[in-house]
Image (cartoon, rainbow, N blue to C red):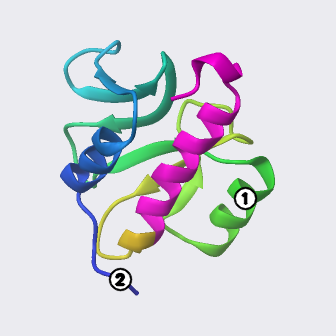
Amino acid sequence: MSEAISRDDVLQVCQELPATTDERPFGPETAVAKVVGKVFAITPLDGEPASVTLKAAPAHAEALVRDHAWIIPGYHMNKRHWVTVTLGPDADGELVKDLVVNSYDLVVAGLPRHQRP
């Protein structure tokens, strides 16, 4: 198991991905990471435990929820295509980083070719 990952770590991973913007459409307490205007990560900035909601392929999302107690179907999102990851001592930091990048890649893959970063 890798070391724990924090809310700030997740925001940093999002920020480092190409053509990413950090927006606050739901108010100042929720960071929404977008690539070319499409959401790939939603991170509440207050409350504990910290969490991040990410896009995932349906079969992958199902396996993640089944295999990790700290991953649940996406909170307020399409439960087949989104997962909510609770950040904390149980979360595998490397897996969470991979899931952020995977979410970004899924969104980019859905963009028209001429819009992809």
Does dot 1 land on a helix, a strand or a loop?
Answer: helix
User: Which residue: 34% across, 38% down?
Assistant: 43
Question: Residue at left 60%, top 31%?
Answer: 77
Residues 34 and 64: in front is: 34
71 to 106, vertically: above or below: below
Q: Residue at x 74, y 42 (%)?
A: 80
- Quarter of the image where one finds residue 2: bottom left
Provide the major secondary structure of the magenta segment. Answer: helix
**Local crowd size for mark 1, using a 10 Å CA cut-off: few (<14), some (14–19), many (≥20):** some
The residue depicted at 80 percent of the width and 56 percent of the height is: 59
What residue is disc 2 on?
2
Apparent side of residue 104 relative to residue 58 in the rendered image (left or right): left
Give percent across and percent down for residue 55: 59, 41
Q: CA distance from mark 1 to mark 2?
A: 20 Å
Q: Is residue 100 visible?
A: yes
Q: Which residues are magenta?
A: 95-117
Identify the disc placed on residue 60: 1
